[in-house]
Amino acid sequence: MAVDAADWDQYFLSIKKVCPWSHAAWTRAAVDLTLWRGVISPLGNWEARLYLAPRHNPRQLKKMADRFNRERPAEEWLWSHPSFAHNSTPVACFIQQDRQRLETIRFSLENLQ
């Protein structure tokens, strides 16, 4: 799993159209990257946490993210796998975010259009 900061910077730049706040959060060091060890940590002051899970296939990631969304309604869980190419992270991962914060951002963006 040799993924360096440049790969992540490029990733966050590449998804600006679908997630406009992510690159700004990344450059402010408000996104936590951590290896998935089977334990979910509270987000705290992080805007997002990516749990890197290089040994998980897309089906496993989806099932776990669905379960986390059911069990943790205050958070929004997404997943990404590099095999899907377009808008995918450079390594398989779960993405943990605060649901209310995301809804506020989405509402603000909709009102700008």
Image: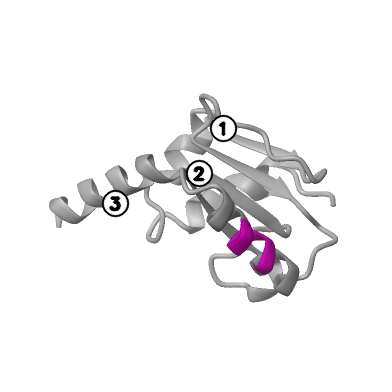
Q: Is residue 50 above or below residue 92?
A: above
Main SS, magenta region, reads helix
Within the magenta stretch, is there residue 65?
Answer: yes
**Which label number is shown at residue 97?**
2
Amino acid of disc 3 = Arg
Q: Earlier in the sequence, mark 3 or mark 2?
A: 2
Q: Are marks 2 and 1 in contact (CB under 8 Å)?
A: yes
Q: CA distance from mark 3 to mark 1?
A: 19 Å
Q: Position of residue 30 (x, y in %)?
A: 52, 30
Task: List the residue tagged with mark 3.
Answer: 106
Q: Which residues are magenta?
A: 63-67
Amino acid of disc 1 = Leu
Q: CA distance from mark 2 to mark 1?
A: 7 Å
- Secondary structure at badge 3 equals helix
Question: Which residue corresponds to the image point at 74% horizontal and 68% vertical from the top-left?
Answer: 60
Q: Position of residue 29 (x, y in %)?
A: 55, 29
Q: Earlier in the sequence, mark 2 or mark 1?
A: 1
- Secondary structure at badge 1 equals loop
Count residues near mark 1 (Cα–Cα under 10 Å), then give few for <14, some for 14-19, many for 20+.
some
Within the magenta stretch, is there residue 56?
Answer: no
Q: Quadrant of residue 55?
A: bottom right
Task: List the residue tagged with mark 1.
Answer: 43
